[in-house]
């Protein structure tokens, strides 16, 4: 092999390596570019059912959320076929179980919004107690700040576990891992007291009316939103420390439990509001998982950016 | 019947009644100590609180000097590179047990047949503990978590809880705990952490807690933590306080009334 030929081959090899390096470098810059620019997930158009997208990836035979919700909503309780479980200590309905999904049985007679006092508008516009913390004109909500779910929904998230124990009904939320401990009058030897530090979930005290557990919730901290904002028209559905909720928990049969609320908040609402009657279907598990809520500052910043962008787009439309 | 025989019978009845009464009193005392549930287990139900424990301002009330000695050289090297800000409770992650029992904040236990539930007031979280001695969650459903996967059995009056499947993020003590002048205040764990807890109701107002901490990836041998004595609180539930990272643990714990 001549020296010239060798030189050409070496040059070719070198250019090959350089070319490869260039390709790798471009690839790497693409990868880092992908990490840098944040592409927000496609959000469904208003009113569209986002669960449809999950249905596309479900294995055959697995019920989607929409299907499960429709099934639970249409379910006819059958206490003969599925007798109400009862506790061995007092024979009252045993609520213990893991439940999903949430299905509305009867809609509220009037919309909660129609009861808001006009004079509360300015307070609501500012976001209530969340002023400065939550930018409601974007799509920022209390969920992003790890607040417990709305008290008019029993502070319940998606999948919930109920525990009946002597003297208590306990709610364990899978999403966010918040819990509610509801002492029941006359079951624990003393009258449960609602006096403690005011909180997001309030202080619950339950009593039995036949087979229905009636829970009075007071002592709220004035921070929860009863329903989310719908910008730009509807400001946050804020609450006050005068919030007073009466819940009715029942177990029509072993397959479901039902939940109903009446809400009063004289500082925010002109009268008492009857919420929807909702129910959840039982799942064949005995425990929910630990799934904590953490504030992620970076995610929070991206979320705010995205919200601002969306708001701008909406304004242009 | 002679008067003498009558006296003997009356005497026997009186002594018998006294004996029976005494026995019944003893049984009653024992019953108030046993505090059994309606289904016959030792009743751990209640809100319980212990004194805060740790190694602060020159006083090591939890023998953390011993724990510190047990860390492997490799773990020590990693711990040297970390600081108080790396403590997961700084971002409101719940403290794992036994650390959660050292905080000096209330812990609530609720019991039903087959399960005990433990709730913490500081860095609120719940633990679900099956008490039937069943195996841990099957491996295909076992996710690493902050509080781990618990299963328990009764050994006489003691509930023995076996905890595995931790996520390796939790610390065994606070960054303020520095038993020696050379201490880093960093108390790492790994995903190999294995805790065995012993919960025992000593009397109506006292609950004793003891933990054995094994972590082959960070400790050279298991750590037998000192026993913690909880006292019953006259409330039916713990406080509901949201931990917010912007408060920082100090503000948060103050808000909680520590």
Image (spheres, grey):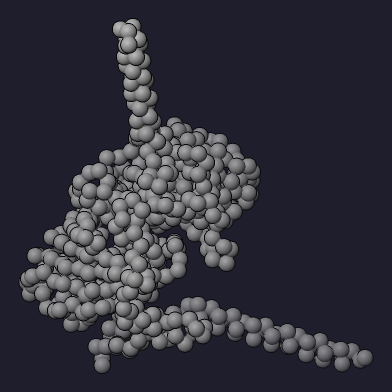
In this orientation, which residue lies closer to the viewer: A241 or A61? A61
Q: Residue furthest right?
A: A1
Q: Is residue A53 above or below residue B152?
A: below
Where residue B13 sits: x, y (%)?
Answer: 33, 18
- Snapshot quadrant of residue A303: bottom left
Residue visible at 29% across and 50% down in the picture:
A167
In this orientation, which residue lies closer to the viewer: B89 or B32? B32
Residue visible at 64% across and 86% down in the picture:
A23
Answer whether residue B122 is visible to the viewer in this image.
Answer: no
- Snapshot quadrant of residue B31: top left
In this orientation, which residue lies closer to the viewer: A291 or B39? B39
In this orientation, which residue lies closer to the viewer: A18 or B44? B44
Residue visible at 59% across and 46% down in the picture:
B214
Q: Is residue A213 above or below residue B197?
A: below
- Snapshot quadrant of residue B42: top left
**Left or right placement of residue B111 versus residue B137 in this view:** left
Where residue A7 sits: x, y (%)?
Answer: 84, 88
**Left or right placement of residue A225 versus residue A22 in this view:** left
Count of residue discs: 0
Where residue A295 sits: x, y (%)?
Answer: 38, 64
Q: Residue furthest front?
A: B1
Say which quadrant the N terminus of chain B sits in: top left
**Left or right placement of residue B198 versus residue A112 in this view:** right
Where residue A33 sits: x, y (%)?
Answer: 51, 81
């Amino acid at each position: 092999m001549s020296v010239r030929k060798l030189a050409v081959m070496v040059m070719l090899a070198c250019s090959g390596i350089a070319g490869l390096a260039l390709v790798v470098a471009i690839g790497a810059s693409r990868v880092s570019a992908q990490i840098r620019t944040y592409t927000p997930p496609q959000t469904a158009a208003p009113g569209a059912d986002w669960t449809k997208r999950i249905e596309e990836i479900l294995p055959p035979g697995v019920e989607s959320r929409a299907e499960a919700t429709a099934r639970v909503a249409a379910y006819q309780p059958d206490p003969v076929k599925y007798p109400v479980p009862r506790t061995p200590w007092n024979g009252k309905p045993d609520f213990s179980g893991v439940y999903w999904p949430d299905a509305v049985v009867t809609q509220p007679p009037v919309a909660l919004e129609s009861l808001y006092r006009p004079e509360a508008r300015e307070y609501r516009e500012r976001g209530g107690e969340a002023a400065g913390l939550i930018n409601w004109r974007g799509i920022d909500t209390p969920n992003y700040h790890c607040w417990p779910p709305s008290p008019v929904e029993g502070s319940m998230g998606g999948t919930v576990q109920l525990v009946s124990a002597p003297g208590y009904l306990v709610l364990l939320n899978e999403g966010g891992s918040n819990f509610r401990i509801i002492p029941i009058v006359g079951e624990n030897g003393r009258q449960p007291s609602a006096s403690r530090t005011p909180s997001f979930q309030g202080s619950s005290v339950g009593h039995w009316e036949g087979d229905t557990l009636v829970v009075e919730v007071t002592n709220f901290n004035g921070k929860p939103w009863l329903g989310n904002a719908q910008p730009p028209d509807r400001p946050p559905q804020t609450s006050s420390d005068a919030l007073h909720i009466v819940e009715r928990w029942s177990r029509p049969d072993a397959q479901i439990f039902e939940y109903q609320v009446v809400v009063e908040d004289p500082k925010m609402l002109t009268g008492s509001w009857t919420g929807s009657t909702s129910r959840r279907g039982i799942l064949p598990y005995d425990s929910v998982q630990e799934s904590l809520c953490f504030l992620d500052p970076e995610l929070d910043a991206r979320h705010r950016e995205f919200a601002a962008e969306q708001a701008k787009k909406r304004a242009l439309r | 019947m002679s008067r003498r025989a009558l006296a003997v019978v009356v005497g026997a009845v009186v002594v018998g009644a006294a004996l029976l009464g005494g026995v019944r009193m003893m049984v009653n005392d024992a019953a108030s100590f046993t505090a059994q549930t309606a289904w016959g287990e030792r009743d751990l139900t209640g809100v319980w609180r212990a004194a805060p424990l740790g190694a602060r301002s020159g006083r090591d009330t939890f023998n953390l000097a011993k724990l510190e000695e047990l860390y492997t050289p490799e773990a020590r090297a990693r711990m040297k590179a970390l600081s108080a800000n790396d403590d997961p409770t700084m971002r409101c992650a719940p403290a794992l047990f036994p650390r959660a029992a050292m905080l000096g904040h209330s812990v609530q236990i609720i019991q039903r047949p087959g399960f005990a539930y433990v709730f913490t007031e500081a860095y609120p979280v719940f633990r679900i503990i099956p008490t039937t001695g069943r195996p841990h969650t099957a491996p295909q459903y076992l996710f690493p978590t902050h509080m781990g996967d618990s299963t328990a059995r009764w050994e006489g009056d003691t509930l023995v809880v076996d905890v595995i499947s931790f996520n390796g993020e939790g610390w065994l003590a606070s960054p303020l705990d520095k038993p020696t002048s050379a201490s880093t205040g960093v108390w790492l764990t790994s995903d190999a952490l294995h805790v065995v807890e012993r919960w025992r109701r000593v009397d109506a107002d006292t609950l004793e807690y003891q933990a054995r901490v094994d972590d082959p990836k960070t400790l050279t041998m298991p750590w037998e933590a000192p026993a913690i004595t909880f006292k019953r609180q006259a409330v039916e539930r713990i406080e509901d306080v949201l931990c917010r990272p912007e408060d920082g643990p100090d503000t948060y714990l103050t808000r909680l009334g520590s």
